[in-house]
Amino acid sequence: MTVDTRAGARLRLRIAAYTEPAAVALVGAVQAVYLQRYGDTDITPVDPAEFAPPGGCFLVGDVDGVAVACGGWRLRRAGADPALRDGDIEVKRMYVADGMRGRGFARLLLAELERRAVEAGGRRVVLETGTRQPEAIALYRSSGYRPMTTFGAYRDDPLSRCFAKSLV
């Protein structure tokens, strides 16, 4: 899928394996942001296979053949974490490279992840971010996400903020 953005750039979103070199580089870049802002990388357990169809999706966004954005989702189920429900889709690893921010790429990426989650039968999108990522919080709030009970590895972290959006 290729989209012209308001800044005139053409973003090409494509399905990628979580282990593809471009995806690995972008995930490494977002982990570096976490390290800078929080003093540690994201400790949430992630299995690359969770981001493969049919139970997951990982997208890389290219501009002029250069990977500049990524994000994915994985299916979650009710059970061990009381905040999660069957049919929940968890967004992970949303990232846009520094020089490409402010062009609407994150919003396009999030919308495409949501579209694909609906196609996969997802009922609700959930995600975790932190207070030291105000730009991410602003994106999610302006995209219709509302605060929810914290979940996952950062459930008890005072810097953690979790959001949800119904897909039905």
Image (tube, rainbow, N blue to C red):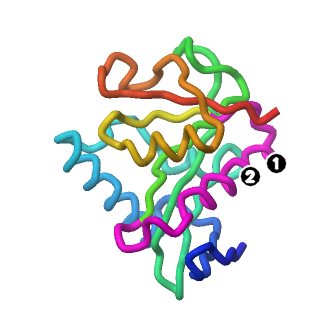
- Residue 44 place in picture, x, y as percent: 38, 35
- Residue 31 place in picture, x, y as percent: 30, 52
Q: For mark 2, what is the residue?
A: 116
* Amino acid residing under circle 2: Arg
Count of labels in the image: 2
Residue 55 is inside the magenta segment: no
Q: Quadrant of the N terminus?
A: bottom right
Dots 1, 2 in contact, CB < 8 A:
yes
Q: Nearer the viewer, residue 103 or 118?
A: 103
* Distance of label 1 from label 2 (alpha carbons): 5 Å
Label 2 element class = helix
Spot the residue most to the left.
Answer: 39
Q: Mark 1: few, some, or many residues within 10 Å (few <14, many ≥20)?
A: few
| Magenta span of residues | 97-125
Q: Residue at x 55, y 70 (%)?
A: 61
4 versus 102 height, above or below:
below
